[in-house]
Image: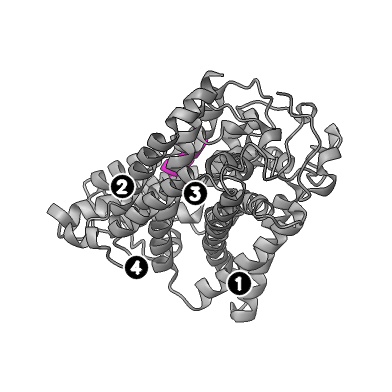
């Protein structure tokens, strides 16, 4: 069905009547959560590689990589954990294919899973709240690098200076997000190339110092080993699992774009960049103390190169956060607020700045990162599992205009505005996962297993099975029609 209908939602104003040439890097994107008309569709799936490759080359990936060794894993164990966790990028690719099919962002497509009203709750929590938390984590990481640059310039890094630095980085990030999709596609290839060049130098230096026979002084065995392995996989997987909104960046592609190409280029970009950057952190941890990754790496990098390294950390974080803020803005619209995408993005940035100031000036950054990454998968794992299962059962058949129909008689109103099968599956998966957690608290299942945290696999399996059992017949009928 051609997606050329006007926007039925009041949340995007002029977006429905945007001319085809509005989708250009020099103009603010007019579209929000409305359906992208065929006349505005353009591009190739291969463009997605650079977009997603830029997301993994950042400070947070170095922190996660170093944390694997700090948790007590040997080098080969940490690398194995890294590979397994990075393979969750395939799900990022799978969740991108509804974009061209529906011409709508993930925040709208998921109405098929949860219903119009149920999806507002889903967007408020897994869409908006978690996105803003990730924005704050990444902004904190960029700020730490920027503080070092400011200190090198001879400026005292006191609290007012820190606030200014954080606001400036956030402003640069939000500028990209406000201009939107075309700006992201245009900028991310040169950004990816620049980051790749800098991190290639870092990789060479790290490899020269790395201990390829590294084992901890007290190797882990039994339950403690499995606890560390599963916690590590969860931390690494949390990055690709956080991109439940990958369809936001594929929805401008022509509807005839091959699904395999969308999955492949999205997954490959996310997998390669995240894996390689985390690997640098892993190898560095065999030679230096990665409790402070930035200072540790500065100690082995050439003095002349350190400013470039710090700038790359800031740039990489701006790149990943621009995507996060973009999707968080769409999520805020999908919650039901009648505001333009640009305004919602700026609101998201304001909240993230406040969280960042708390994280850097009050809390312990490394502990915060580890706890947040492990806790968010309690929601993100089941959410991704339900979404992926729906795509498979529905065979990616999504009707954009129908998804935009929010009326009580609409096809995705279900019962009382909620698809109770989707809501139950998500709650069952998250509830079960919460019993398995061993991070800020120890759930009863984790306690029974001597601290082994099975929240990620259990939550995803429970949600997937529940949704498949409750929706397979109705979705199989839709797929056959």
Crowd band around label 2 with a 10 angstrom C-alpha radius: few (<14), some (14–19), many (20+):
many
Query: Residue 145: x, y in percent?
Result: 54, 63
**Magenta stretch?**
268-276
Q: Quadrant of residue 166?
A: bottom right
Q: Secondary structure at mark 2?
A: helix
Q: Which mark is residue 41?
A: none
Residue carrying label 1: 354
- Which residue is at 39% across, 63% downward? 371
Magenta span contains residue 271: yes
Is the C terminus in the top left, top right, bottom left or bottom right quadrant?
A: top right
* Res. 341 in view: yes
Vertical relation: 477 (above or below) 328: above
Q: Which residue is mark 2?
A: 458
Q: Secondary structure at mark 3?
A: loop
In the rendering, at what x and y percent does residue 6 appear?
A: 81, 36
Residue at 77% over, 54% down? 340
Say which mark, if any, is on residue 440: 4
Q: Residues within 10 Å of mark 3 (few under 14, many from 20)?
A: many
Q: CA distance from mark 3 to mark 4?
A: 19 Å
| C-alpha gap between disc 1 and disc 4 | 22 Å
In primary-sequence order, the first of circles 3 and 4 is 3
Residue at (43, 48) in percent of width and height: 424
Q: Residues within 10 Å of mark 1 (few under 14, many from 20)?
A: some
Label 1 vs label 3: CA separation? 21 Å
Q: Nearer the viewer, residue 166 or 343?
A: 343
Mark 4: few/some/many CA within 10 Å (<14, 14-19, 20+):
few
Q: Which mark is residue 242?
A: 3
Tell me the quarter of the picture where residue 435 sits. bottom left
Q: Find out whether the residues at labels 2 and 1 contact each other: C-beta distance under 8 Å.
A: no
In this rendering, position of residue 104 left or right of residue 392 = right
Where is 337 relative to 323, above or below? Answer: below
């Amino acid at each position: 069905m051609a997606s050329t209908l006007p926007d039925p939602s009041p949340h995007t104003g002029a977006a429905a009547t945007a001319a085809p040439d509005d989708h250009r890097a020099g103009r603010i994107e007019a579209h929000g959560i409305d359906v992208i008309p065929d006349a505005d569709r353009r591009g190739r799936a291969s463009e997605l590689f650079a977009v997603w490759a830029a997301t993994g080359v950042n400070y947070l990936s170095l922190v996660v990589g170093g944390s694997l060794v700090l948790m007590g894993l040997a080098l080969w164990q940490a690398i194995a954990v890294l590979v397994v966790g990075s393979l969750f990028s395939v799900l990022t690719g799978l969740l991108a294919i509804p974009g061209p099919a529906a011409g709508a962002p993930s925040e709208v497509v998921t109405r098929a899973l949860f219903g119009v009203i149920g999806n507002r709750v889903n967007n408020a929590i897994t869409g908006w709240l978690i996105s803003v938390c990730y924005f704050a984590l990444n902004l904190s990481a960029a700020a730490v690098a920027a503080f070092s640059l400011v200190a090198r310039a001879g400026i005292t890094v006191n609290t007012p200076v820190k606030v200014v630095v954080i606001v400036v980085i956030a402003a640069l990030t939000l500028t990209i997000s406000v201009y939107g999709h075309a700006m992201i596609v245009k900028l991310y290839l040169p950004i990816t190339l620049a980051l790749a060049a800098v991190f290639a130098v870092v990789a060479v230096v790290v490899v020269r110092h790395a201990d390829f026979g590294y084992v901890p002084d007290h190797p882990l065995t039994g339950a403690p080993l499995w606890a560390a392995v599963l916690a590590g996989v969860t931390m690494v997987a949390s990055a690709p699992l956080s991109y439940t909104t990958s369809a936001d960046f594929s929805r401008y592609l022509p509807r005839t774009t091959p699904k395999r190409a969308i999955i492949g280029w999205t997954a490959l970009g996310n997998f390669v960049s995240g894996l390689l950057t985390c690997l640098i952190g892993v190898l560095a941890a065999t030679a230096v103390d990665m409790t402070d990754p930035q200072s540790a790496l500065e100690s082995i990098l050439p003095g002349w190169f350190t400013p470039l390294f710090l700038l790359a950390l800031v740039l990489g974080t701006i790149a990943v956060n621009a995507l996060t803020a973009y999707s968080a803005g769409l999520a805020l619209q999908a919650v039901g607020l009648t505001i333009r995408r640009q305004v919602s993005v700026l609101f998201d940035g304001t909240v993230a700045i406040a969280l960042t100031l708390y994280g850097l000036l009050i809390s312990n950054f490394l502990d915060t990162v580890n706890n947040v990454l492990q806790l968010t998968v309690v929601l993100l794992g089941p959410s991704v599992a339900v979404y992926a299962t729906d795509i498979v059962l529905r065979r990616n058949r999504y009707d954009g205009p129908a998804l935009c129909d929010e009326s009580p008689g609409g096809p995705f109103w279900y019962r009382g505005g909620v698809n109770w099968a989707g809501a139950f599956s998500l709650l069952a998966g998250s509830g079960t996962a919460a019993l398995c957690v061993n991070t800020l608290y120890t759930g009863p299942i984790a306690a029974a297993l001597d601290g082994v945290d099975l929240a990620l696999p259990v939550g995803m399996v429970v949600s997937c099975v529940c949704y498949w059992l409750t929706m397979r017949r109705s979705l199989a009928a839709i797929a056959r029609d």
